[in-house]
Amino acid sequence: HVDDEKVVVDRNLITNQDPANAFLLALKVVELLRNKQEAQEASKILLVDDPQFGLNADQSRLYSEQKDKKPKEHKSALIIFTKGAEEMEVVISADVLRRAEIDVVLAGLCDDKPVECAKELLIVPDVALEKVVNRKFSAIVLPGGMESNQIMAKNVYFGEYLKEKESECYIAAICSGPLVLAAHNIGKGKHITSYPALELDLCKTYEYEHEDVVVDGNIITSRGPATAFQFALKIVELLKDKKKAEEVAKILLVDDPCQHMFSRASHLYNWSIQRPNIYTRTAWISRLHVCAEHSRFYSEKASKTRKGDKSAVIIFAKGAEEMEVVIPADVLRRSDIDVTIAGLCGKEPVKCNKNLVIVPDADLEDIKKEKFDAIILPGGWDNVQTMARSAEFGEFLREKETESYIATFCHGPIALAKHCIGKGKCITTCPNIYFLRSFYKYVDKKVVVDGNLITCEGPAAAFLFALKIVELLRNTKKAQEVADILLLDDYKETRGQFATLNGKELKSALIVFANGAEEMEVVIPADVLRRAKVG
């Protein structure tokens, strides 16, 4: 059981939240081994002033006995998709909901065979829809993709299924997904949003809102790929609670540095909790309406990627972060970059970190002799460990290091360090991988470019990471064009989260001490400075 207390005692197990609470952990041990009075005396000597210390101690003493009595409420979600679905909207929804401990089933509308999505990615459903039609779900999720949604809209059987479920669960649709709801008369007259170009088609059936996420009763709608995180987090909030949604957002690094990217979504997120089902039509019209006509049927027109003069390969293995495979593949293919998705261990379908199954285009052996402008390595602990252990993969990277950009996410630099790629360069990673700082220079940015090495903090920055690669392989104009199609309205502002350093030296500090020094006054400055990227 995970609690949000600073220090938790459960019988003989004592745990604390983070380094800032190390004093409280030590004082709790003193209290348990000695007594509360001695703990308070020690806290006065150390000038630890925490009025909640005693309160936390009392609250946590019988933690397990209290928590064990609270029954767990099971929540589930069904994501239905078919040929031409937007892979990013399938994957982000599934990943976020599974991180929130919601039981997610990916159902193929027609069968359980691999589905070719809008940007050619093959995703294997868990089941065919017909196998779960009698099962109850807390939410049904419909990703966008014009081809996929047109198939759903024409399917009478599917329409009857939605009507049966309309009164018993949330129905969530993103991007062009609300067209399916309109075709089957689901939620008529309610407030919705969608991909901006579809407003005229939908405003006859619904009250249309220019917001990133809209909830009206049991109908949840959202605009497109760039709002998929907020869409999924809103579902988490409704099925679980706000605390769980914030917890998952924190894990994915959807945090304050990302606020420009998600500004309107975050605003709606808080506002709709305070005033549910009350809507005020906003005056602003998305600047994306200017590109609406050319992007309206984007998935349908571009279902087969036009092969370009630039190429990239995404290499992954079991346990890879599915979002870090899918988002770069989608964004780069929209930028006319030829993308190959390669399985490190073969061509067999690969089960990713949150159980999504992706079918590779090729394997490592197939691509060894090919030349790529960029090599992309997703994160995911098991995936990175497999990469780090593979001598064959290390040899491949060393051969390509001088001729390609090497781009990686999250834990990915662990594999690079193991194979001695880019030693001494500036990188970013997911927080708390401190041992890499002896091999690389850490920079606190979402995306860092140092020479031909590109690194990204984690899943929430995947759009920025992919667009940075587009900038480097194409140009800024192309990256902005794709950002507009994806509805990344604040892309220009979020480019401040990039750092292009080319090996520039970072700040440094020297801590001098001798016998008898106060060890905490050595350790705490060292720790804090290193976390602030000071060498």
Image (tube, helix red, strand yellow):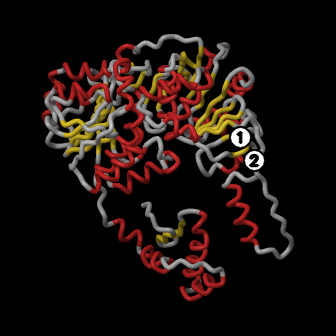
Any part of residue 302 in sight: yes
Amino acid at pointer 2:
Leu
So how many labels did they put on this image?
2
Q: Residues within 10 Å of mark 1 (few under 14, many from 20)?
A: many
In the image, residue 241 sits, relative to residue 116, either above or below, namely below
- Residue at figure coordinates x 33%, y 50% from the top left: 237
Amino acid at pointer 1:
Cys
Any part of residue 97 in sight: no
Cβ atoms under marks 1 and 2 closer than 8 Å: yes
Left or right relative to 521: residue 188: left
Q: Position of residue 109 (x, y in %)?
A: 27, 24
Q: Residues within 10 Å of mark 2 (few under 14, many from 20)?
A: few
Task: Give residue 84's mark.
Answer: none
Q: Which quadrant would residue 511 be assigned to in this image?
A: bottom right
Q: Nearer the viewer, residue 379 or 500?
A: 500
Q: CA distance from mark 1 to mark 2?
A: 9 Å
Q: Position of residue 498 (x, y in %)?
A: 60, 38
Residue reaching furthest to the front = 283
- Residue at figure coordinates x 25%, y 54% from the top left: 275
Which residue has dot 2 on it? 506
Nearest to N terminus: mark 1 or mark 2: 1
Q: Position of residue 176 (x, y in %)?
A: 29, 27
